[in-house]
Amino acid sequence: MGGSHTTGLLFSLISVWLLLQSAIPLANGQCGPNGDRPYPPGETACPPGPGERPGERPSERPPGGRPMDERPQEGGGGNGAGGASCPADGIGYTGETEFVGQGPKAAPLRGTVGCIDANNATGAPLTVEGQVANIIYGPMENGFSSQQFSCLGETTIPGGIDSLTAESMVAAHCGSSVSEVSVLDACGGHARPYHYHERMSCLYTAAPTTGHSTRLATMLDGRGLYGKFVATDTLPADLDACGGRTGVTPDSNGEPVYYYMVQDRPPFTVGCFGPVTSVEQCRSLYPDSCGNGDEITVTTDNYGSFRYDPDCPCYEPTAGYITNIPAGETTPNGTLTSLSTPTEQATPVLAPGGTNKAGLSDGMSLMTTAMLTVLSILLALSI
């Protein structure tokens, strides 16, 4: 009996070790879409991402992961936030001098493009995971790799692709859906510092008299950002390539003003600071990133395959698919049929392989199983 007991104990210990080893890479993959959520608890840093130097902040990571000193100069404030500092209480922000009253201008390709107002539908910027959620970023992500999704293997999703298309590329590669791999929460934000890319549906409501969506933010050029409806359940048909239009808003006292509206498709908020008269004018604001010869073919789960111009936030507004390639220059293999937007997901799905029925990530499930095995061993020894 003693020999079999010892053999069983040894087998159990080996099983625990194997479970913990398999959990480690999955846990590393939960560092977040920007590599800024170290895991397991107690860790202070995530492994470097593709093309990233150790210690380089994800918010400083240029398109495709190239080090800062090797990146081309970008238009519209470049990599940073355009000098923006969003007030924590959402009160008093009026824009940045380099953008206010300057006419059509490129928006920052990384970093802040607007600040949440206190007079949004919630009455103040939200607090998410202990952070004041008062920042809006442009549409582009910094890229994904196996650090975020183990199913990508050696494949990387390059930086400079809008968040929805990037997630759809992950879904296509991993045989999943956008809602299963989304790195954004139900309101369209994520990461540290917490910032919004899409939707922001938790921050606006409908004006009681017109049904027009209420204001939720002030952009760098001092103009307002409103929800997606121009009237009750009615989407606007006249947005320019920057994402703006001229009209009467719930708070403009009956006077027409130029303002921006949230969109379900990229650029989601602003592609540039307008007004502009065409997509071509928007593209001309980004001479170093629009039409500079770095176009790629992207394959997505429900939009098919099409050409894409990284770090070019100027999209064809009437195309039936997501594209920022000028009309007539490309033909997609598929068309956009629907935009998947998670509505019940309270926190981003960052764990590769999705979640189990208990809501635990794969890595956490494995580690939990290992702990239960240890407890079983201790119980057996006590008996």
Image: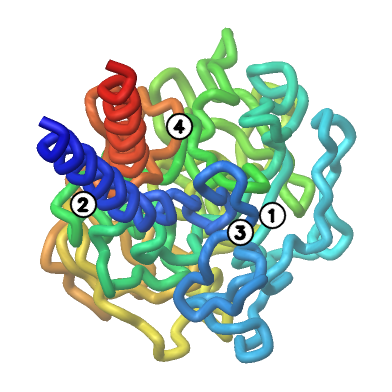
Question: Which sits in the foreground, 172 or 96?
Answer: 172
Q: Is residue 185 visible?
A: yes
Q: Mark 2 points at which residue?
A: 336
Task: Give how far across and how far down residue 51 sits, in percent.
Answer: 49, 80
In the picture of the structure, the residue carrying the numbered disc 1 is 112
Q: Residue at image x 63%, y 42%? A: 194
Is residue 367 shown left or right of residue 133? left
Q: Which amino acid does label 4 sit on?
A: Thr
Q: Where is residue 336 in the image (x, y as percent from the top left)?
A: 21, 51
Q: In this view, does 216 lie to the left or right of 176?
A: right
Q: Earlier in the sequence, mark 2 or mark 1?
A: 1
Q: Which mark is in front, 2 or 4?
A: 4
Residue 339: in sight, yes or no? no
Q: Quadrant of the C terminus?
A: top left
What distance separates the C-alpha of mark 4 from that of mark 1? 22 Å
Height in image: 31 above or below 47? above
Instruction: Return the disc, 2 or 3, that comes first in the chain's sequence.
Output: 3
Three-letter code, disc 1: Thr
Residue labelled with disc 3: 45
Amino acid type at mark 2: Leu
User: What is the crowding at mark 3: few (fewer than 14 residues within 10 Å), some, or many (at least 20)?
Assistant: some
Who comes first in sequence, dot 3 or dot 4? 3
CB contact under 8 Å: marks 3 and 4: no
Camera-side mark, 2 or 3: 3
Within 10 Å of disc 4 (Cα), the crowding (few <14, some 14-19, many 20+) is: some
- Residue under the image location 57 percent in, 9 percent down: 209
Mark 1 surroundings within 10 Å by alpha-carbon count, few (fewer than 14), some (14 through 19), many (20 or more): many
Query: In the rendered image, which residue does mark 4 sit on?
Result: 347
Give whichever of discs 2 and 4 has the lower sequence position: 2
Disc 1, SS: strand
